[in-house]
Image (tube, helix red, strand yellow):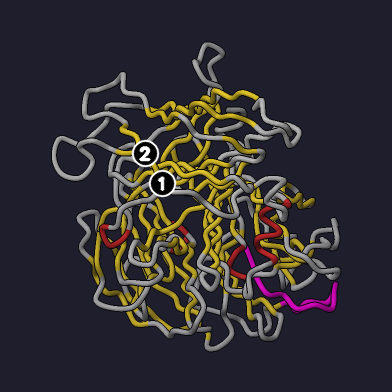
Amino acid sequence: MPLFVNGAYTSQSWSADAERLVNWYPERMESQAATTRGALYPTPGVEVFATASNGGGRAMFAMNGRCFAVVGNSLLEVASSGALTTRGTLAVDTNPATICTNGDGGNQLFITSGGNGYCFDLLTNTLTTELTGTAQFGGMVYGYFVALDTTNSRFVISDAFDGTTWDPTQFADRTIAADRWVSMVATTYGQLWLLGSQSSEVWYNAGTSPFPFAPDPSGLIPYGCAAPFSAKETKDSVVWLATTRTGGYQVVQAKGFTPQPISTHAVEYAISQYDTVADAYGETYEDQGHAFYVLTFPSAQVTWVYDFNTGLWHERGTWIAEQAQYEAWRPTWHCFAFNQHLWADRQSATIYTAAIELPLDVDGRPIRRLRRTPAVFREHQRLQIARLEVWLDAGVGTSTGQGQTPQVMLRASTDGGRTWGPERTASAGAQGQYQARAQWWRLGQSRDRVFEVSVSDPVPWRLLDAFLTVQRSTEAA
């Protein structure tokens, strides 16, 4: 089947394209000798790494062998064993928290939470309140902690390598454009991205005195930020959910000072249908050679993920079996610590470790993976579909329990994905049955056939391709 291995793309018109991809991501084969040009590989499962006493996850951070999390109103230090030590109490509002460090030069963390700015001394393990009501975002550039006050569209800086000293004269207001700053990203390559509601700008350390920072001569960037906590740095760029003075939503990636849209029209249409987008959260991480941007819309209960390596999108979702629907993927805040990907759950006090080898989702729920295929369509002719085979890694069943004989579920739509027929199953082979073939016969006639393949057994599901046997019907068109 052409483009069975592909990203998600559900267009405004389902007759044009109704593809969907949930809890798989595509990977292109790098070898010219590969038997397939690509594969759908499983997104990570999770298992409990640590559990706090209460609250939901609000931030994660790790550097120099130490790991910290904000869960509820607590600043927690996370040990490699999963033990948690409370390092202080923070103010809380509806926003996430932020954590950064000034490294060995200052041995401090700067945390923003509930509108306040806090300094944590890494040598004495003491937490002090430094800013009250004026710090929604924090960052560090060239040893200076930076706090953004979105209410007054102003950023302030600490003394160099000293988060306990904030000279009230060391600040900058927005003057280049009229819209207020709503978000900030302090990059590891020394830039301070200040995102407004309709436009943005970049500041840098100009070495001036008494205030060292100045806007870059590149000038104004005609993209604002539609969701303040969607803005994140990846290894060589900044990415966020953008809007402009003329409206609309796009996910953009800025390498240098020129943002480029990376969202497809299908993703943009989906976002435009959500009642609320301002509460979207962004996170970035790398795994298996792929760099991902995870964009979660908690009000809409949707998580979109962009793969910077392939340029393709997929969805991630926690399957709620009792409601027969996906919710937004609950792991939200990430750090890499102790050679593990750690994620804080925004809805519970749990910190998870995530890996593609883990077979279950949060709360021990099965992971339901889904691929809705491109339409089987040929100039609106009636087609007879004799056989469909999903080529996959077979024989990977478990030795006991669920998954001993993993099943692949298939359902079909004859109207481009609007309505669906009954579900049929095929075996992917018990453990060691590597020659098993998941295939279905006598699939009937249609002018516009869409298939949906889903799995939920706790095994490593890897799909390589799908094959169809199709004939034109002899019936009158």
- The answer, for residue 214, to whether it is visible in the render is no
Where disc 1 sits, the SS reads loop
Q: Which residue of the protein is positioned furthest toward the left in this rendering?
A: 400
Cα distance between the residues tagged 1 and 2: 10 Å
- Residue 50 part of the magenta-drawn span: no
At numbered mark 2, what does the secondary structure look like: helix, strand or loop? strand
- Which residues lie in the magenta part? 172-185
In-front residue for pair 324/279: 324
- Name the residue carrying label 1: 423
State the quadrant of the C terminus.
top right
Q: Where does residue 61 sit, x and y in percent of width and height?
A: 42, 60
- Look at discs 1 and 2 and give the one toward the viewer: 1
Residue bearing the label numbered 2: 408
Judge from the rendering whether residue 207 lies leftward or rightward of residue 232; answer left or right.
Answer: right
Q: Of callouts 1 and 2, which one flags the residue occurring earlier in the amino acid sequence? A: 2
Foreground pick, 428 / 363? 428
Q: Residue at x 15, y 35 (%)?
A: 399
